[in-house]
Amino acid sequence: MKAYSMDLRERVLADCDEGLKTRAVATKYRVSESWVRRLLQRRRERGEVAPRKGSGRRPKWTAYADTLRNAIREQPDITLHELKQRYGLPLSVPTLSRTLHRLGLTFKKKCSVRRSRTVLT
């Protein structure tokens, strides 16, 4: 998500300085109340309001995106643990799950055991 512009930040701060409540400012500019509060806090504590720079580094999983796409295409019922072990991925299982979601890769696991039937008596 891109950072809010300096123009918007200045307008939000100007309205806050004029005495408008946080909720009114947030509603007026369609931003969250917490963002308005954090912006005011940063200005008060550090004297800065400009957007902070990101780390600039890419997530670790981007290097394995093609590998993951091919693996899911070849074997759509592979488990996350199997995927991690088979391809020697240095990612945790939760990270692997989020990565597949971000890549739009879904796979449905099939239960290998018959479903139990509930008998009502």
Image (cartoon, rainbow, N blue to C red):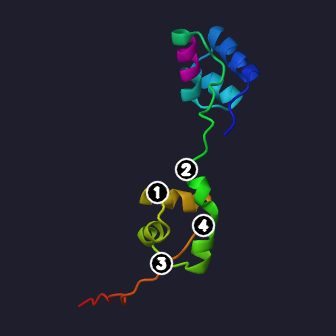
Q: Quadrant of the C terminus?
A: bottom left
Seen in the picture, residue 41 relative to 90 is either above or below; the reply is above
For label 1, the residue is 90
Residue type at mark 2 is Lys
How far is disc 3 from disc 2 in space, using C-alphas?
A: 26 Å
State the extent of the magenta-drawn residues as a range: 38-43
Percent position of residue 2, x then y:
69, 36
What residue is shown with label 4? 67
Q: Is residue 94 above or below residue 19?
A: below
- For mark 1, give the secondary structure: loop
Looking at the image, tell me whether mark 3 or mark 2 is earlier in sequence order: 2
- Measured in 3D between alpha carbons, the distance from the residue under mark 4 to the one under mark 3, in whole angstroms, is 20 Å
Q: Position of residue 83 (x, y in %)?
A: 48, 70
Residue located beneath label 2 in the image: 60
Q: CA distance from mark 1 to mark 4?
A: 13 Å
- Which disc number belongs to residue 109? 3
Q: In the image, what residue type sits under mark 1?
A: Pro
Quick one: label 2, few (<14), some, or many (20+) residues within 10 Å?
few
Q: Quadrant of residue 24?
A: top right
Q: Position of residue 40 (x, y in %)?
A: 57, 16
Badge 2 element: helix
Left or right of 33 in this view: 121: left
Q: Residue at x 72, y 17 (%)?
A: 11
What kind of residue is marked 3? Answer: Lys
Contact check, label 3 and label 1, Cβ < 8 Å: no
Q: Residue at x 52, y 76 (%)?
A: 108
Q: Residues within 10 Å of mark 1 (few under 14, many from 20)?
A: few
Q: Which mark is residue 42?
A: none
User: Residue 59, relative to residue 50: is it above or below?
Assistant: below
- Left or right of 38, for residue 1: right
